[in-house]
Each structure stands twice: as C-alpha cells, then as structure tokens.
Image (cartoon, rainbow, N blue to C red):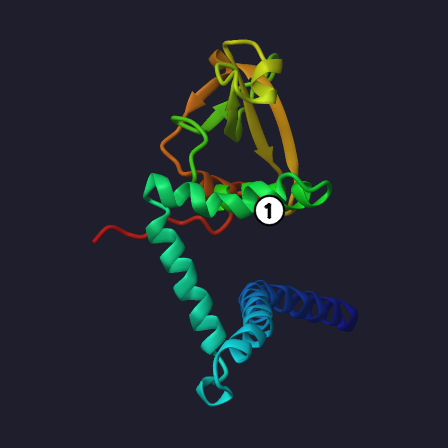
Amino acid sequence: MKDFLRERIVKELGKNILIGLSILLPAMISVQLIVWVVRGVESWLAALWLALLPQALYFPGVATITFLLIALIIGVTSRSAITERLWKIPGDLMQRIPLVRNIYGTIKDFLDLMGGKSFSDSSVVWVTLPDRAGRLLGIITREGSERDTRLGRLMGEDDVAVYLPMSYQAGGYMVVVPRGAVEATDMEPGEALQLIMSAGLGQRLEAEG
C-alpha cells in the first residue's frame, strides 16, 4: 500500500512539473530570445551611434529604438518600386557571396514565410500523396509555370513545389506534385507553419463575442 501511494505521489509530482514546464518554458524562451536580439542590436548600433553623435545623447535602449525606426522607414519606403529596388541591393550583394548566400537566403525565406508572404495564389494547401489516405498541410513555394526560376524549369508545367514542415523541429521536405494533388486552404503561411510545428496543439479559436 505504501509503495502504491509513493508511486502515485511521484507520478502526480512528475505530471504537475511537466505541466508547469509547458507553461513556463515557452514564455521564458521567448523572453530570452527577445533579450538576445535586443542585446545584439544594442552592441552593434551603440558603437555606430557613439561614433556619430556625442556620448551625452546616448542612453541604453536608444540603439534599439533607432533600429526599429530604421525598420519602419525601410518598410514604408519599400512600397515604392524605386526604393524597393534600392533596399534590395544589400540582399542582392549577399546572394553573390558563396556560403553567405546560403545562410542569408535560408533566413530570409523563413522570415518571409513567418511574415505571411505568399509565394503564389492560395499558397497554403492540403497535399494528397498517391496511395495515401491522409493529407499533409504544406506551403507552395514554386510553380512549374515560373520558368524564370531554376526549380520552375526542372518541373512540369502543371507541377507545384510544396514545402512540408515537420512538427516540433525546424525542418521539412519539399515535394513536387501535380496541381491536381493539392487543395487550397484559407490560411496564411505563417499561421500554417505555427500550426504544423506545434502539431496542432494550443490552436484554439477565440470565442465569438
């Protein structure tokens, strides 16, 4: 009887600890990531700020505020065709540097996806693979009709390339399937990525008012 009670108590303690960690760790990791980004921005822009302006004008946090203002200005001005080409110049230069272009391209594509950038009309789709009863949720990244891209030239005219993310990790697969194997959904790429990477957990809709 004592062994049973001891085992039950240990099991309950372990269960409650896991529940507590599931609540605590996401918030802790999110805050830590934000702190890491802010510290990186501060250390990078603080030196530039101090080199251009008197030290009396500098205070902790001004570099981060400056960074956000720069991002806002770039975001607003990039809506113009002329300035959009101008802001693309640094990225185009990085795309020409071996190794750097791979890192830069991967990070940019991932952030574009998380930001909800659509790579084509109805970019989030259900994919039905041959001889499979289930469906996979994925994001169209290229179409066979896009002959100006390297992947587009390798695909058939009626094919689409679909990225299939994996749950609980950064990774996934790219599959090329006929357009008839995909079904469009009313979902943004960033929302789909979050849904897949969490395996659908915690995706509750807010009650309508």
Q: Position of residue 95 (x, y in %)?
A: 62, 40
Residue tagged 1: 107
Can residue 208 be seen from the camera position used here? yes
Q: Is residue 141 above or below residue 74?
A: above
> Which quadrant of the view contains residue 33?
bottom right
Tell me where residue 74 sits by quadrant. bottom left
Q: Position of residue 144 (x, y in %)?
A: 52, 15
Q: What amino acid type should be assigned to the residue bearing mark 1?
A: Ile
- Toward the top, the furthest residue is 157
Q: Residues within 10 Å of mark 1 (few under 14, many from 20)?
A: few
Query: In the rendered view, would you say 168 is above or below 58?
Result: above
Q: Name the foreground residue: 208 vs 72.
A: 72
Classify residue 197 by image quadrant. Answer: top right
Q: Kindly state the secondary structure of the residue where label 1 is placed.
A: helix
Can residue 195 be seen here?
A: no
Instruction: Give the quarter of the figure containing the N terminus.
Output: bottom right
Q: Position of residue 111 (x, y in %)?
A: 52, 47
